[in-house]
Image (cartoon, rainbow, N blue to C red):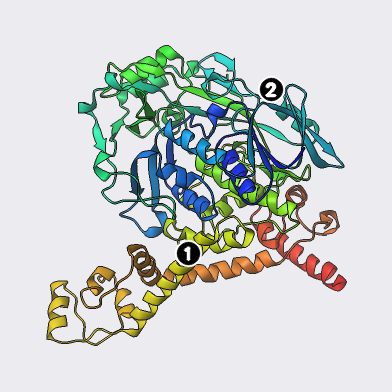
Amino acid sequence: MIYDCIVVGGGHAGCEAAHIAAFMGAKTLLITMNEKNIADMPCNPSIGGTAKGIIVREIDALGGLMGHVADHSHFQIKMLNSAKGPAVRSLRAQADKVTYPQNMLKELKSTKNLELMESTVEDISITDNKIEAVILNNGQKIFCKTLILTTGTYLKSNILIGSENTEGGPHGEPRSNHLSDNLKKIGFEIQRLKTGTPQRIKHSSIDFSKLKEEVGDNDYYTFSWDNEPSYKINEQQKCYLLYTNDSTHQIVLSNLDKSAMYGGYVTGVGPRYCPSIEDKLVRFKDKERHQLFLEPESLYYDEWYLQGFSTSMPRDIQDQMVHSLKGLEHAQITKYAYAIEYDAINPLQIKPSLESKVVEGIFTAGQINGTSGYEEAAGQGIIAGINAVLKLQHKDPLILKRNEAYIGVLIDDLVTKGTNEPYRMLTSRAEYRLILRHDNADLRLRDIAWQVGSITKEQYERTKAKKDQITKLMNLLKLEKIKLNDETKTKLKKHQIDLSASKSFYELLKRPDITLKIIEEFLPLPFEELIKEQVEIAIKYEGYINKTERDVERMLKLEEKQIPEDIDYDKIKNIASEARQKLKKIRPVSIGQAARISGVNPSDISILAVYLKKEYSKNE
């Protein structure tokens, strides 16, 4: 049997890739070492967060599973940055570590065209530089037309606690010993990365009276545009806030040499934006304390996650560190923190479609590409799955632009700039974040998803109806004007609003002191809250959005200037040697991508543009 698509790895990237490939009609096989570890959460079992919550909404808009499953698996949810502008708001849910993987597995097992297999892939077979098959650890060869590698942190992974160095993946499971070496033999550049996880604390040993409560929001939310809330606000679980102190810092700093990281036992590069506690104290010496959170991992067992306290210190030092924290003086550690090293590929060797430049038909997604986080992995997974199927259909790949999705920013950063540390998505990485909001992901992406075939007709029609309602409300506000009479003046005065002339409600809403709720006192608006939210944001931020759109137009003009695949950069005179080297390695697909490469300067771009116009226009 020949599968249309084989997905290796059952983490968050693998789940999305396998599901969407099968949904789009490809006969798909998902190979995982252990079915029980499908959608495993070895780190904090949370979904979303700053920027990440927007990615989850985008995955859902494209037809993915993460948001849908999270909606039915969490016990607390809140909107982050709700007091700030809409561009930086994101949902975050504390998911149940037991329920989430179970629900994900149910979704996969009910997906048509998808089979699951428990095994380990140790090698691949290629013919004429195209993927032919995967080879299992028992020697069995399984043939495929496309392959998606989503191996997570299992490639030659080592667990580090102090000077201890143990071969194995998260939870001590067997690692993949040979796949990364075999990938290296066929031309993949392998790099060593590191991540880590903090201690788990026994619930009954925590003195919660000394900690500050962190509760879920009083508003109902869902990640998925297709779900209704399935939880009760007053039944959400509490999380708790605490801080490090002088004693904690003294213990850590006086034992730095015993840390796997600072003791010289780590060879991989760790994540800059999710550092260990020892790394925080060394890099931010001026901070008197660091914020930590205690969050339940599951309703089914007695372990709490100490967010922000990851370390690779020996166990006895970890005991001292934890006991120095307020409320944890008598805490019992059920699982000690550890660092994990693993192999990953150089993401500069993948195309914007996530297909490898090394072997045709191989796609990669998730931590193998140098990213960190469940959401970043899942976002890549759904794009890899969609593009594997589009390749089978002999169609152009789906490449989301930087103005279309955070997922587009993530992938463009990886394939254009590369990374030598685990990449984490931040709102600051998205230059067009005002139009890449959590509230409009379906409006941005569901038309695209419908075109490539990754959502149902019902999902598409629902979004189309939503757009129609937005247009209807927008036109109503432009058409209707406020009538200035004694009654309206009295209502306006109540809100301390002074109005000298009649204006359309559209113009009124541009004023910072007027909201749609105030306008509803003068004009009934029989529309859903989501529709009102979209319209209010669009009108309030119209000037900023228009400026962003102009910036996007300039960027798109550069993206339209394609660079031929067969270009010989050695023939371009006067280009800087570093730029030439980077261009030859990355082989950007457009002038826009070339301009974003580190080491390629504006003068190099000008020379490149002139060369393209001179050499290729005459061949048209």
Query: Which mark is drawn over residue 36?
Result: none
In the drawing, does residue 591 fall left or right of residue 236? right
Mark 2 or 1, closer to the camera: 1
Q: Earlier in the sequence, mark 2 or mark 1?
A: 2
**Cα–Cα gap, marks 2 and 1:** 46 Å
In the drawing, does residue 421 fall left or right of residue 577? left
- The quadrant holding residue 615 is bottom right
Amino acid type at mark 1: Thr
Coordinates of residue 45 in the picture (x, y in percent): 43, 34
In the drawing, does residue 597 fall left or right of residue 125? left
Q: Is residue 371 visible?
A: no
Which quarter shows the C terminus?
Answer: bottom right
In the drawing, does residue 62 fall left or right of residue 493? right
**Vertical order, 598 against 442 (above or below):** above
Residue at image point 32% right, 63% down: 529
Residue where numbered disc 2 is placed: 177
Total labels drawn: 2
Query: How many C-alpha atoms fall within 10 Å of the one at disc 2: few (<14), some, or many (≥20)?
Result: some
Coordinates of residue 480 in the picture (x, y in percent): 31, 84
Residue where numbered disc 1 is placed: 463
Q: Considering depth in this image, is 177 or 410 the residue closer to the camera?
A: 177
Which quarter shows the N terminus?
Answer: top right
In terms of secondary structure, where does tag 2 sit? Answer: loop
In terms of secondary structure, where does tag 1 sit? Answer: helix
